[in-house]
Amino acid sequence: MSAGSAWAQRIDGDFALIDDVAGPNPDGNQATVEIDGREFGVAGEVSGVGTSGDQCRILYNTDEPTNASANDKNGKVSQGKFTTLTFVVVPGAGSATTAFPDGALNVAPEKCKANASVNAALGKGKVNVNCTGENIYSGFSADQLNSYIAAFQDRKDVKINVNQTGSKGTLKITLNQK
């Protein structure tokens, strides 16, 4: 059996997921799970409104998963440690918050796991991102960090925790499309 015909017997493509509670952007939670031939990955974005109307976005990506599998109905992608994060803030009118230099802050946390699964037959999927380390929020100003905390403080799908000095923290993102 050739490789091409083996792939024809399993799900194949990019699967868009939108969280059932948060919905799509501008204040939402969405991701794409890639199961495409030999290429697997997961990329997503959460966004919210922070202090003074600041638009706060967190993007995550893992295009070199440590584990991946697929069959004719389901696919799974996971990265046990190395998932990259990108933070983008667009300050609201009159906000004390400034944008990040170069427009975005790219971070490779010490430990950042991403797990995604899709059931193509049922149109369901789930993504979990769990990051910890001293370098997640170290590039933030106090105003930027406060705006991000405000943007996601009342949401169940995004959890930001930072120690008193701002030097160590966690980030958890959950997406469920049922």
Image (cartoon, rainbow, N blue to C red):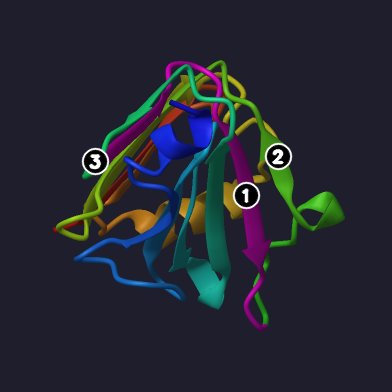
Most frequent secondary structure within the magenta stretch: strand
Give coordinates of residue 66: x percent, y percent. Answer: 47, 17
Q: Is residue 31 magenta?
A: no
Residue on which the image places disc 3: 74
Give coordinates of residue 115: x percent, y percent. Answer: 35, 31
**For residue 87, which numbered disc appears in the image?**
1
> Is residue 101 visible in the rendered structure shown here?
yes
Q: Specify the quadrant of the image occupied by residue 16.
A: bottom left
Give coordinates of residue 22: x percent, y percent. Answer: 28, 66
Q: Specify the quadrant of the image occupied by residue 139.
A: top right
Looking at the image, which is closer to me, 37 or 120?
37
Using the numbered discs, state the Cα–Cα distance from disc 3 to disc 2 in whole angstroms.
31 Å
Residue on which the image places disc 2: 106
The residue drawn where x is 62% and y is 78% is 92
Question: Mark 3 or 1 closer to N-term?
Answer: 3
Q: Amino acid at mark 1?
A: Phe
Q: Secondary structure at mark 3?
A: strand
Residue range of the region highlighted in magenta in the rendering: 74-93
